[in-house]
Amino acid sequence: MTAGCVPLCSHLRKSLLLPHSIRSFSALKVASKRSTRAAPPFLELPSSTSKASTTSGPAPAAAVTPSSSGSSKRANKTEKKVKKVPAPDNTEAQLKQIETMMNMANTSNLFPTMDMWGSKLLTLDVEIPRDAPLRMLFSNPVAYWHAIQCNFSNWLKNTYSMYTIAKARAFPGVNWDRDLRFSHLFLPRTWRQLGNVSSASSNSWLAPMRRIAMDNYLAIGRAIADKDVATLKVLTMADHAVKVNKIIRSRQPGHVWQWRVTIFRSLATSPGATVVSIRSGEVYIAKEPPKRGNRLVIHALVKLETTQELKVFTKQGQEVNPGSEEHVVEYLVFEKIGWYDNTWQVRDQIYKYDGGGVL
């Protein structure tokens, strides 16, 4: 026997003569934990270390035990967690969007027959003012102050949008003698215009728009009763166009509708139409201004109060539904695209909630 075999034989003899308690599962588990801490299973040992272990003796038994396999699985999971790629930053996506918009602005003059800015838009954040009577301060003070904050935020947005529209001279039917300057903001008459969108005065900058809104509202009602799809295409858009088309398709084919509206106030002022919220945004961002109009898209939420009556007849003149006069309050969103030569179109309807349902 060579001298090199003596350590190996003695090592085997010692391992076989070990007591049963030392070779138990708990002992092996402790040994495997120690080996795992010393050299994790997912790390490869250098070649010199593997050679040394071959000469000194057999590999430790802990490498093939269930505890060592479980620890290796846990180590692999830890490694996967460490190697998990972090979520990408939104800054790069935003910069790409800005770069795309700038390229559109630079190349818009190359396509004069295509409107690159007339894409579909979501309804801006117009909102119905909250009711905040003084008695609510004592019955529900939290709801009262929340309503005050919402109304104040709506007023600030209304005022800024009115200033933006005035700067662009985008109010319909208003003759501007001179541009609106920053110094004009210190005049009380300017604030009476900017800060009071719900004014019923005929001198308000929104008075012509209110008359247009009511005229278009009456034309839409008559078009629904007469099944005038061509008029509805001109006066409605987006969700409201889908809504009125569903009303027409759901009608009985042999029925005739007769619809009329009673207006309490004179047509010379605001015939039941009140602007409660208005928003504007500069969407046309090309370097050159549009050939007509302005760069703005305006959304105005208009409250329409009317008394309506609807009667339904057959083609032979027999009355199916006698109908009765009803007081109707509707909140419609009117849109005006500044560089289009079209009228104010109804794009959406907003409903008022009292906490328990729709009013």
Image: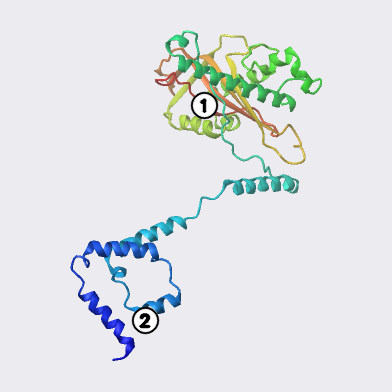
Q: Quadrant of the C terminus?
A: top left
Q: Residue furthest right?
A: 178
Residue at 54% of width from left, 26% of height from top?
223
Could you tell me residue 322's position as x and y percent? 41, 15
Q: Is residue 20 left or right of residue 97?
A: left
Decide which of 288, 86 is in the foreground and name it: 86
Q: Quadrant of residue 123?
A: top right
Quickly name the residue at label 1.
Answer: 349
Dot 1, how many residues are within 10 Å of its Cα: few (below 14), some (14-19), or many (20+)? Answer: some
Q: Is residue 357 above or below residue 236?
A: above
In whole angstroms, how far apart are the C-alphas of marks 2 and 1? 85 Å
* Picture mark count: 2
- What amino acid is found at the position of numbered circle 2 in the picture? Thr
Q: Disc 2 or 1, which lies upstream in sequence?
A: 2
Q: Is residue 227 above or below residue 32?
A: above
Q: Is residue 185 above or below residue 265?
A: below
Which secondary structure lies at badge 2?
Answer: helix
Q: Is residue 12 left or right of residue 277?
A: left
Q: Is residue 24 above or below residue 216?
A: below
- What amino acid is found at the position of numbered circle 1 in the picture? Gln
Q: Quadrant of the N terminus?
A: bottom left
Could you tell me residue 174's position as x and y percent? 74, 20
What colouring method underlies this structural image? rainbow
Quickly name the residue at label 2.
Answer: 55
Which secondary structure lies at badge 1?
Answer: strand
Regarding residue 90, the answer to whether it shows in the image is yes
Dot 2, how many residues are within 10 Å of its Cα: few (below 14), some (14-19), or many (20+)? Answer: few
Residue at 39% of width from left, 64% of height from top?
38
Regarding residue 204, the answer to whether it shows in the image is no
